[in-house]
Amino acid sequence: MIAHLLGTLEQIEPQYVVLDVNNVGYKVTVPSAVLSRLPGLGEKVKLFTVQIVREDDISLYGFLNKEERSLFMLLLSVSGIGPKIALALISGFPLDRLVAAIAQADVALLSTISGVGRKTAERLVVELKEKISKAYAIRSSEFSTGIKGEATLVNDSISALISLGYSPKEARLTVSNLEVDKLGSVEEIIRSALRRLA
């Protein structure tokens, strides 16, 4: 198993890169989220890799950090999810947003990714919700801790902000500065929160 590669970036293509490691060129498939953060050609880069061996193919998949690689491997553990869909999911959302979408069972958001239908999104949630929540310490019941206001309103509002792409910390801080009970509904809280975040 090749766990990581450190080498010179020799070639960048829409779906893969070629990394020169001691005069050996490794073709590494990467998500578009990684492509956009790579240094220029001729620069050194370290990729954390997953090697997948099949009867007719040996492929390397690369990521810029261990968290992305871990999430990729978790996604692959779901029945019916192969490398292509796992890469599409990681490319489709920032890491924290994808993690939050799974932890919050946001099937609608997950279904917006090409190749991920509603059934696949539901399977992702069912098989990964607990694992993701433990691995990334996301417990929606704890969102409201220390924030004034009705707990359900606070939890739902923070969850909604996370699903819109804000970090749990950012979402909690924003909601904690609002008068939740006066606003009275998740929709009003979100509107007020978005005004503050703009």
Image (cartoon, rainbow, N blue to C red):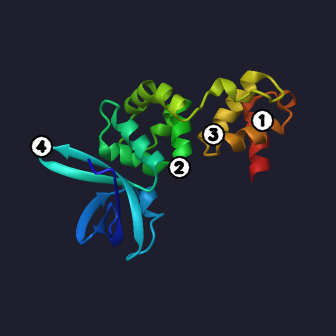
Residue located 54% across and 30% down the image: 133
Q: Position of residue 173 (x, y in %)?
A: 77, 41
Residue located 85% across and 27% down the image: 181
For marks 2 and 3, the one nearer the N-term is 2
Residue placed under numbered mark 3 in the picture: 162
Q: CA distance from mark 1 to mark 2?
A: 26 Å
Between disc 4 and disc 3, the foreground one is 4
Between disc 4 and disc 1, the foreground one is 4
Q: CA distance from mark 4 to mark 3?
A: 41 Å
- Give, as a three-letter code, the residue at label 1: Glu
Is residue 192 found left or right of 76 in the rendered image? right
Is residue 180 found left or right of 37 in the rendered image? right
Residue located 38% across and 75% down the image: 41
Residue placed under numbered mark 4 in the picture: 55
Q: CA distance from mark 4 to mark 1?
A: 55 Å
Q: Position of residue 25 (x, y in %)?
A: 24, 67
